[in-house]
Image: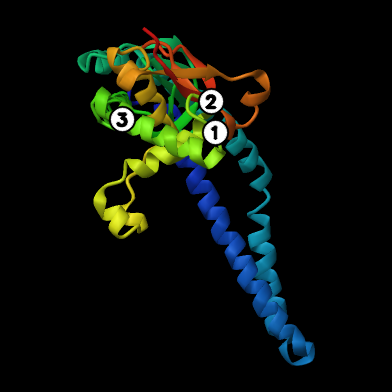
Amino acid sequence: MRTNYASDSQLEMTRLRQQLAEMRKRVNRVINLMKRLSDLDQNRAVNLFKIKGALRQIMQDAEGLDGLAERLKDLRGWLAVYQEELEGVQQELQNRFGTELEKELRRRGLSLAGRYPELKSGLFTIELDFDKWQAILWYGPKQERLMQCALSPSEVAKAIDNLRRRLGSQLSEKEFLQRLQSAYQRALISTGGKEGDRVPIIKVLSELAYLLQEPRFYQDPRREHYKGYSRADFSYDLFRVRHSETSGLFHRKLRLVVATRALTRRRQDFLWVPDDETGKGTVYSHLQFEEVTS
C-alpha cells in the first residue's frame, strides 16, 4: 500500500501555506494599524502627521493583498485535488478491510458474509461507517445495538469474539430454565394470569433480570451492584434453550408466541430471537410454559 500519495500535492500545500501565512501577516498589520488609526483619529489636528503615516502603511500592506483572490482560487483547486486523493486512499482501505476482517474472524472460528456497508458474522451485524472510520456492532439484523469501535479489522474481530463469549446469562440450560420459569410465575402474578397463560415477553425479561442478580444486590440494591442483563442476553438465552431437551423441564414446555404486526411497532412489545446461527430469526411478543401431556 502506497504511503507517499502525492508529493506534488504536498509541495503545493507548502507553497500555499507560505503564501497565505505572508498574507495573514499583512492582514494582522492592517488590523493593528487600523486600531492605532482609530485612537489617533480622536484628535486629528494634533495627530495629523501620525495619522498620515499610519494610513500610508495601511495602503502599502493593502496592495500586497491584491493577490488574495488568486490565492483563494489556488486553495480551492488544491483542496479539490487533495480530496480526490483521499477518496482514493479510502477506497483502497475499504477494499482491504473486508479481506483482512475475514482473516481475523476466521482465526477465531467465525465467518463473514454480506456486503458494504453491512457485513454479518453469525448472530452479529457489522455496520461500517467509513466517513467516521468506525464500526457499529449489532445483535441480529440490527435488532440491538451493542457497541461501536474503531474501523480496524483486528479490533472489530476481537470485539465480536468478546461479545459472543459474554452474551447471555452464562447459566446452564437447566439452571436458566429454572430461573425462567420463576420469572414467568412472577409475571403471571403481576398480570393477573393463570398457569399456562401467555405473558408479555418483555415483562418476563424484567422479572428474569431481577432474579439473575447476585446476593449483594438484594442486600444493597445500588447501581454498582446491579448485574446487567439486556434484551440481547435474553434473546440469546432463549435461542439456546428453546430447542433443547431440557425445554420441557418440570413437565412444562417453553413456547414463544410470534408477534402480530400490531405488536412489532414498539420495542417494548416484542423481542427478536434467532432461529439459527446464521442470523435468521423471528420476533415474539409473548411467552408461556404449556403443560406437557404424555
Q: Nearer the viewer, residue 106 or 14?
A: 106
Q: Amino acid at mark 2?
A: Arg
Left or right position of 3 against 274: left
Q: Residue at x 58, y 38 (%)?
A: 75
**Residue type beneath disc 3:** Gln
Between residues 15 and 293, which one lies in front from this camera angle?
293
Disc 2 target residue = 198
Q: CA distance from mark 1 to mark 2?
A: 8 Å
According to the picture, the residue beneath numbered tag 3 turns out to be 178
Q: Earlier in the sequence, mark 2 or mark 3?
A: 3
- Residue 143 appears in the figure: yes
Q: Is residue 278 left or right of residue 52?
A: left
Where is residue 244 drawn, in percent x and y?
31, 13
Residue placed under numbered mark 1 in the picture: 193
Marks 1 and 2 close (CB-CB < 8 Å): yes
Above or below residue 95? Residue 137 is below
Q: Image quadrant of residue 260?
A: top right
Residue 270 is drawn in which quadrant? top right
Is the residue under label 3 in contact with that under label 1 (CB below 8 Å)? no
Disc sitting over residue 30 in the figure: none
Query: Quick one: SS at disc 2?
Result: loop
Q: Is residue 10 visible?
A: no
Q: Quadrant of the N terminus?
A: top left
The quarter in which the C terminus is drawn is top left
- Residue pictured at 61% horizontal, 61% vertical: 27
Q: Position of residue 224 (x, y in %)?
A: 32, 55
